[in-house]
Amino acid sequence: MTSSRIRKLALLAAGIPILSSCVIPDDTSRLAREDVTTAAARREMVGLSEADIRMCAGFPTATADAGPSGQIWTYQRTVQRGNLSIAVPTLGIGAIPGVGGSVNVAPGGYCNTQIRMLDGHVAEVAYAGDNNLPNSRDALCVSTVDSCVTYARQRQHKAPAVSR
């Protein structure tokens, strides 16, 4: 083999890992926008009472005393996302090493929705965990807060009782 051919092969071998690392970034927070429902929950759930939160989200998975900052309720959700799995059989021929593997698109994730209660009412909503989708931040947290956003909107738009 000529030295120029060896250099080309070396460059090709060095470039494959670089190209594969550029396909999908691990952290999409700079690229994706926050999910509209989780963003609305940050605003619209503020002010709901503890009883309201239990009605729309159920009982928290865990609670923690935050001293003068109130109490933090955590709702933990593991999300099994639909996925596409393709398995390629491993092939090995003589001295040639085996080639094969699998591709898994949209693996599962989890979301911890934290709600800070102050004086018996929601003061803040935050999200943590492996909860992003490639084009939407905090999207796996929607299942925890969507009912509460609807609940808060219904309570805001409830017509006052008419007395006779």
Image (cartoon, helix red, strand yellow):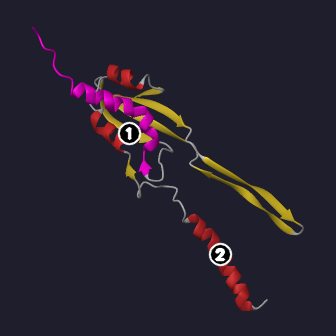
Residue mark closest to the camera, 2 vs 1: 2
Magenta region: 136-164
Residue shown at 30%/32% (left/top)?
45
Q: Is residue 1 left or right of residue 111?
A: right
User: What is the quadrant of residue 95 in the picture?
Assistant: bottom right
The amino acid type found where label 1 is placed reads: Ala
Residue 149 location (% of width, % of height)? 33, 32
Instruction: Tell me residue 12's x, y (percent).
Output: 66, 78
Q: Is residue 159 left or right of residue 83?
A: left
Residue 142 visible in the displayed image:
yes
Write the residue at 53% across / 60% down.
24
Q: Is residue 68 visible?
A: no
Task: Please state which amino acid type lies under the numbered disc 2.
Answer: Ala
Query: In the shown orientation, is residue 131 left or right of residue 66?
Result: right
* Label annotation for residue 14: 2
Is 70 inside the magenta-drawn segment?
no
Residue on which the image places disc 1: 126
Pick the residue in front: 111 or 104: 104
Q: Quadrant of the C terminus?
A: top left
* Quarter-of-image position of residue 153: top left
Q: Residue furthest right?
A: 94
For the residue labelled by badge 1, is the local secondary structure a helix, a strand or a loop?
A: strand
Identify whether 58 is placed above or below 137.
Answer: above
Residue 62 versus residue 36 in the image, above or below: above
Q: Mark 1 packing: few (<14 Cα in 10 Å), some, or many (20+)?
A: some
Q: Position of residue 69 (x, y in %)?
A: 32, 32
Q: CA distance from mark 2 to mark 1?
A: 41 Å
Q: Main secondary structure of the magenta part?
A: helix
